[in-house]
Image (cartoon, helix red, strand yellow):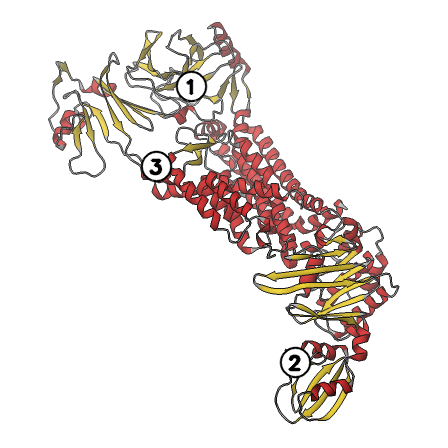
Amino acid sequence: MIIQCENITHYYGKRLIYRDLNFEVRKGKILGLLGKNGTGKTTIINILNGYLQPQSGVCRVFGEEMDKLSPATKGRIGLLLEGHIQHSYFNVRQIERYYSRFFPNWKKEAYYRLIEKLRVTPTQKISTMSCGQRSQVALGLLFAQDPDLLILDDFSMGLDPGYRRLFVEYLKEFAASGEKTIFLTSHIIQDMELLIDDCMILDYGKILLHESTNYILKNFRRFTFSTTTDKPFAENKILWNTGKAGMHWETYSFADADKVKDALLSDGREIIDFWEEKLSLEDAFIGLTGKY
Amino acid sequence: MYQAIIYKEWIKTRKALGLTVFVFAAAGVYSFMKIGESVRSSGLVSMWETALQKDMSMFPYFEYLPLFAGILLAITQYAPELQFKRLKLTLHLPLPESKIQQTMLGYGFMAVLLLVCLAMGSLLCGLRLYFPREIVSASFWNLLPWFLAGLASYAITSWVCLEPQWKQRILNIVAGLALLSLFFIGAKSGAYSPITPYLTAFVEASFFFSIYSITRFKEGIQ
Amino acid sequence: MKGKQIVFVLILIFVTVAGLWGIPELVKTATYTKARYPFVYFSSIQKKFLMRESDGRKEPYHDDEGKIYSEKEYDSSLPLLNYRQLTVNGEMPEKIDSLVLDPREIRVKQMTFRYSPSEKNTPETGLYIMYESLPKKAKLESPGDVFRLKESIEFIDAESNTVNAEKSELFQSALLKAGFVFPAQWTYGNLSIRKPYDEGYFSLDAEGKLFHVKMVNGRPYVRNTQIALLAEPAFFSMLEVADKRFYGFLFDKKGNSYILEADDGKYKPVQLDIAPFDIDRDEIMIMGNLMYWTVSVQSDSGKNIYALETESLKQLRSTFLEAPANRWHNFASWLFPVYLDFKATNTEYIAPNLHFTHFHALTANLISAIIAIFAFGNVKMGRRIFNSIYSLVFGIAGLASLFFVPFFEKIRIKDN
């Protein structure tokens, strides 16, 4: 077990962020923490790294409590801050030299392999680079560090599709051995299905779902139908976000078509034009969290 | 690993340090030009008499220079760390957090100390060419509180800069200004001698103040 | 973080110190009024103290027995002070008590002297300037060198910034010959070139003997004054009086005051017939004329005023003026049982001074302690008690500093 979080409860002032949050990340997994803006993804990352004391609960990384991580453990964790923040007063060469002193297994080539693809000079200051270029520098540094656990906070933020895809491919390659664990957050779901093994979807105050990506892609469906009345449907355990979408009605479910239909018919109305579709991860995310 | 942190601090501060050294040197040269001018216009003897009777400062331009140098250095060192919370990266390095902190503060302290000692040394040595040791020593006492203020302003500014919360930062500024004003009570040269041990103790203690700010940062206060 | 509690306490203490000084300082700036004493002068006519109040009252002139004077009566009661004006108006008496008044004599006997403890309690450079006491020209000339007098006497030439060995040796041997024992304890004189004549310096040697050192025709003039005071001399203040009757004022370590008279090459201390005063705290002011000296000694509690007979310095009359009430002291005695300041009027030195005002200011501490129980929101009992005790001890400054330095765990209110 690489990460364990137990009963995390946190408030900002009086606003509840989560109550009794529990999850684990096993070795070799790529876990995506997905959620809309403001659901507390960065807050989890901060708690994990010991930069925020939750009101109660504890997180352990490599078995150590989050606010007492030993230097050795910190060396095993690669951290990407939201917005690919780095020490941007360094230039490309300086920052590599700086970080190389801290990590015994520093892989200089891994860093320069990425940098070579960028059209930057070795003496270019990071602060003068574009967002995409900066993300490559940050990523290159993480690969050179070669940590056992990568924690990436909203790595796709501000990246154009090309860079995002590039990032995903590098991460996949990095994790290929099965020895590396990656914990990442994102509010952009596109491309994520290529990368993450497990999905943890966060809603305001709680975890909506923690399942493998495969399971979601395989089982989670959208069902579109028409019905005779505009009366809203009662809450139902197997149905997610049932509602009217334009002319039609939609509902989402992990259950098969028959069970869904039964559930819809339970209040005695008529269901017509009923059909089901497979979903991309992004559509599934919307199905789970709703459009608003 | 500690050299790497010092390297980082150097990259952040080298321009500010260069500027400070330049301003100090310029102020020093200008001070001696002024002394030379007085010597040429009214003679050394009269300069000596004025120095004895009026207790005028030989280096009035240095009153606030160390103070501003300390503030500038602390800001260039810590503002980038607090901007976008880069301090998280720094504290995430595989070293004990307290050691990281001490190295950063130690770098700044040594930089200000070196600057202040060099400035003090060269000003007083220069003065010794024209004046007897008593007047040089009066000038030393005249400069000492100002130069100590440079160390204190560095420590206080670090405390303010590293504080994560704006409300608290303003309270720190108010308290810091009150404490710093102790270094600028207008007085005769040498008048500071009874309070100097207290001020020195304060300067030393103030270097621990930013631990408070960093602890608050670590607790996630914002 | 290790030691964070210590750091918290450290910051709290320093902020409290800043508060113990800063808050009263602000109140002082807002309320301080300078003590306004009347101007007091001993009347050679009435033989009483005449006062002129400056607080804007209608009838400002009175004597120490409360009798009111008109301005004209007041002016003519002090002929030795107002002789110019009275002479112009033709109202100057020819004599007082059978003493025939000579305008020139009135002028040369006129004398003012002030002493403030900050003259003694001040950093000294340890360098002095020796003028020629018998200058060839009418005014004093700058000698081109300075001297130090501690372990030995050394003259330093300004132009070359080196010791003038010859002149130093000359004075050194003169001092040794006169019996001066080094190191000197103190040396006082008047460095100014703007004075009518120069009498050099008075220096106390290691054995407590007072020496007079000056330069006459370029040669050292050193005399052991051989005076014996009631206690060891503590301070000498040179005063170039017009009639050259004396060199200046001497104060001994017990607070007795003397003038050091010049008596045909001999030195004679004449004690002022006034009560000893605290030379480290009290100020003295002397206004002398042909017949009487008016001496005021001002302390925190008030002003002692004496009239002395000019010739003998014997006391004729004395009075006491209580210190006027000060708004700042009133405020302080209700708000701050103790406060800190760094600059006192009785010294040039900057040092922390803790002042105790009045025990009834403890009420302010008690109120602070009660506020501290409730003012910091929902915190644990232990913290409440700490806040309260801290505010009780340090009063308003303690309470303020608790606001300034919040405790770490304030944000982590346990809700279970």
* Residue at mark 3: chain: C
Q: Residue sitting at 56 percent across and 37 percent down?
A: B202
Q: Label 1 amino acid?
A: Tyr
Numbered label attached to residue A235: 2
Q: Mark yes or no: residue A7 visible.
A: yes
Q: Residues within 10 Å of mark 3 (few under 14, many from 20)?
A: some
The correct choice, above or below, for B80 with respect to C257 in the image is below
Reply above or below: B117 against C400: above
Question: Is disc 2 placed on a helix, strand or loop?
Answer: loop
State the residue position of label 3: C329
What is the count of numbered marks? 3
Q: What residue type is disc 3 on?
A: His
Residues at marks 3 and 2 touching, judged by CB atoms closer than 8 Å? no
Q: Is residue C393 left or right of residue C7?
A: left
- Where residue C233 sits, quadrant-wise, is top left
Q: Nearer the viewer, mark 1 or mark 3?
A: 3
Q: Is residue B207 among the parts visible in the rendering?
A: no
The amino acid marked with disc number 2 is Glu
Q: Secondary structure at mark 1?
A: strand
Are the residues at dot 1 and dot 3 in contact (C-beta closer than 8 Å)? no
Q: Which numbered mark, 3 or 2, is in the foreground of this view?
A: 2
The residue lying furthest to the right in this view is A177
Q: Chain of mark 1?
A: C
What residue lies at 40% left-to-right and 38% top-to-bottom? C362
- Say if A49 sits above or below C127 in the image: below
Q: Earlier in the sequence, mark 1 or mark 3?
A: 1
Answer left or right for C134 relative to C158. Answer: left
In which chain is the residue bearing label 2? A
Answer with left or right where residue B60 lies relative to residue B117.
left
